[in-house]
Image: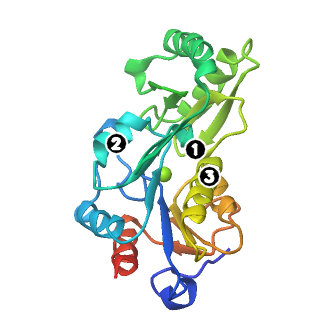
Amino acid sequence: MTLPDALESFETLVPTGRPLVVFLDFDGTLAPIVDRPEDARLAPGMGDVLARLVGRMPVALVSGRDLADLKGRTAIGDLVHAGSHGYAIEGSGLHHEVGAEFLPDLDRVEAALRASLDEGGGFQVERKRFAVAVHFRRAGPGGEAAAVRAVADALKDQPRLKATEGKMIREIRPVLDWHKGSAVRWLLDRWRAERRDAPFPVFIGDDVTDEDAIRALGQDGLGIMVGDVPFETQAKAKLDDVDAVRAFLERLAG
Ligand SMILES: [Mg+2]
């Protein structure tokens, strides 16, 4: 499917005269994808444009990263941070957390994966507060199959946990009906209640977990996907890369 380019079609996609609220993924959207997730940084100039944007409208970052990790990379003005795929929301007077009852299950799965995968051999097991991630970007051919096998084994006796897919990553997360889209809806409810004019929501992301967030916007909103989109999407537009995201945010900031 070919989506219109969000920069070229800016005027037709973004309504004028309505307040906007903006939701942004982090990795692959504001920060270029890097081999090791701990090395990811905001793209050059991105911090400045985020600071200007958040001075003009509510802006929330919605990421699979832990809240503390996300905040450490993006400590800018009045940004709202939603970490762990939206399980933990904080900022601008808002606070919400779900899922603490799953922490012991995640501890057990983390131990099983560290025992079964060779972390020197290109696999990386990353414990996040509400997830255990297996990265196989550096594991070479066969890495994905081995990661999928290890994850399936670790989940055998864990009915309260499930595996999810992303780019060069498998993640184990609680079986709980809460995701990036739930966090977007939770924030939208609050921001709508504060305003008389219904704000127009914009979401920009690059991965399959961002689809939940785009669906949560409903028809009266703009979902944008970054880069190649090898899956079904309800996004209305695309941006080529992180630099194009920065240019789009510059125009939103006005
Ligand atoms: Mg991403």
- Give the amino acid type for the residue marked by disc 1 in the picture: Gly
Residue 144 vs residue 210, the one in the foreground: 210
Q: Which mark is residue 71?
A: 2
Report if the CB atoms under discs 3 and 1 are less than 8 Å apart: yes
Classify mark 2: helix, strand or loop. Answer: helix
Q: Distance between the residues labelled 2 and 3?
A: 23 Å
Q: In this view, does 59 lie above or below 132?
A: below
Q: In this view, does 45 lie above or below 252?
A: above
Classify mark 3: helix, strand or loop. Answer: loop
- Give the amino acid type for the residue marked by disc 3 in the picture: Val
Q: Residue 208 carries which label?
A: 3
Residue placed at 62% from the left, 52% from the top? 208
Q: Disc 1 marks which residue?
A: 166
Where in the figure is residue 160, as x and y percent of width and height? 73, 21
Where in the figure is residue 125, as x and y percent of width and height? 46, 23
Residue placed at 31% from the left, 67% from the top? 55
Where in the figure is residue 218, as x and y percent of width and height? 70, 67
Q: In this view, does 99 lie to the left or right of 78?
A: right
Q: Disc 2 or disc 3, which is closer to the eye?
A: 2
Q: Which of marks 2 and 3 is nearer the N terminus?
A: 2
Q: How far apart are marks 3 and 1 (CA)?
A: 7 Å
Q: How is the image coloured?
A: rainbow
